[in-house]
Image (cartoon, rainbow, N blue to C red):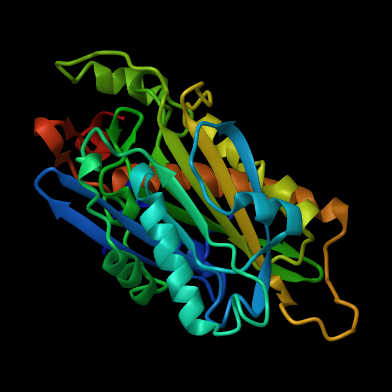
Amino acid sequence: MQKKIRDYGIKIGSLEPGRLNKITDVSGVMAGHATIDDGPLKTGVTAILPHQGNLFTSKVIGTTHVLNGFGKSVGTVQVEELGTIETPILLTNTLSVGTCTTSLIDYMLEQNPEIGRSTGTVNPVVGECNDMYLNDIRAGAVQNRHVREALASATVSFKEGAVGAGTGMKCFGLKGGIGSSSRVISYPHGSYTIGVLTLTNFGSLEHFRLNGQEAGKAIQNRLSDRREEPDKGSVIVVMATDLPVSSRQLKRIIKRTGVGLSRCGSYIGNGSGDIMIGFTTANQIKHEYDGQLNRFRAIHEDDIDQAFVATADATEESVLNSMITAETVTGRDGNTLYSLQEFIDVL
């Protein structure tokens, strides 16, 4: 089993995590990877499935938010307009967005023969970060089979670190990748889960903070190469919950992922693409119109602060988990990124 940041005695916030401390603590959510790790090829695909049914016919309430828009995502315009997500969410490298989009469309067409015939088209959702420091991104290593592998391998107990879309990612000058965390929140009307998955490829080492400590400066003192680099990477944050909320309330919640990023030391740099995607499994929307009213459940606005806290804490821990679970990696042209594991003893 992978050691996560809590296994090193570092606890973020006061709320308790779910059973796995992953986004998949939200019932029905699954995630999977296809990892390409072959010499200068360090990349892949990560898939997040909001539920196990047909997402096109039973959509989930969703929303997006952009902190800094230096990114090349697909599908977020329609999610923002209609407030629903109708496909799995794919994450990959910047130049593989097209391949993943086409493959995801094919996957949805196979499941839904009515698309493009008796009903409209489909809105694939794909996010990206640029892994060119470790990965030969021009080689176009990601193929259709990798998308299918990521979708088919989806499980509740997925790996974190340098896997899937996170294989070649760089976070705060160290090895980044896929991280995840969750929090359980309770009200008189029930207990719910906030789950976060991050694809981390952002931040500069000098600004890195670990649970409030200036960890980046301590790490710099251990490195022979102390170059300071601007924050010009990206991060994709996917937040899932079973909390009954509207798309508007969900947007308010996912904005708080930015709090977790900033606690780690991000200042949301000019060259960074910081994009958030959120969904709730509590309210599902049928694709076919039956002439009846849609019925929604939603929390009172006074309940929302606890969700804000949970989202900020889970995002912060998810970023740290992406770094602590990733091993040291050498990729394209001998470029090397060290794991946070190598410095945890001095932090």
Q: Residue 82, image x and y in percent? A: 74, 59
Image coords of residue 16 (percent x, y) = 56, 57
What residue is shown at x 32% (from left), y 46% (from top)? 8
**Does residue 37 appear anywhere in the picture?**
yes
> How many badges with numbers are in the image?
0
Is residue 270 shown above or below 144? above
The quadrant of the picture occupied by the N terminus is: bottom left
Which quadrant of the structure image shows residue 90?
Answer: bottom left
Front-lying residue, 89 or 201: 89
Up-down relation of residue 119 to residue 163 (above or below): below
Work out which residue is located at the far top of the displayed protein and give it: 227
Q: For this view, does 345 lie left or right of residue 212?
A: left
Left or right of 274: which side holds 343? Answer: left
* Residue 65 drawn at (x, y percent): 65, 43
Quadrant of the image occupied by residue 172: top left
Left/right placement of residue 118 relative to residue 88 reads right
* Image point (30%, 39%), residue name: 131
Question: Vertically, is 109 above or below 15?
Answer: below
Query: Which is nearer the eye, 105 or 269?
Result: 105
Residue 63 can be seen, yes or no: no
Q: Could you say where residue 173 lies in the image, as x and y percent from the top left? A: 30, 27
Residue visible at 73% across and 59% down?
Answer: 83
- 77 vs 8, left or right, is right
* Extreme-front residue of the structure: 117
Q: Is residue 61 above or below residue 107?
A: above
Image quadrant holding the C terminus, namely top left
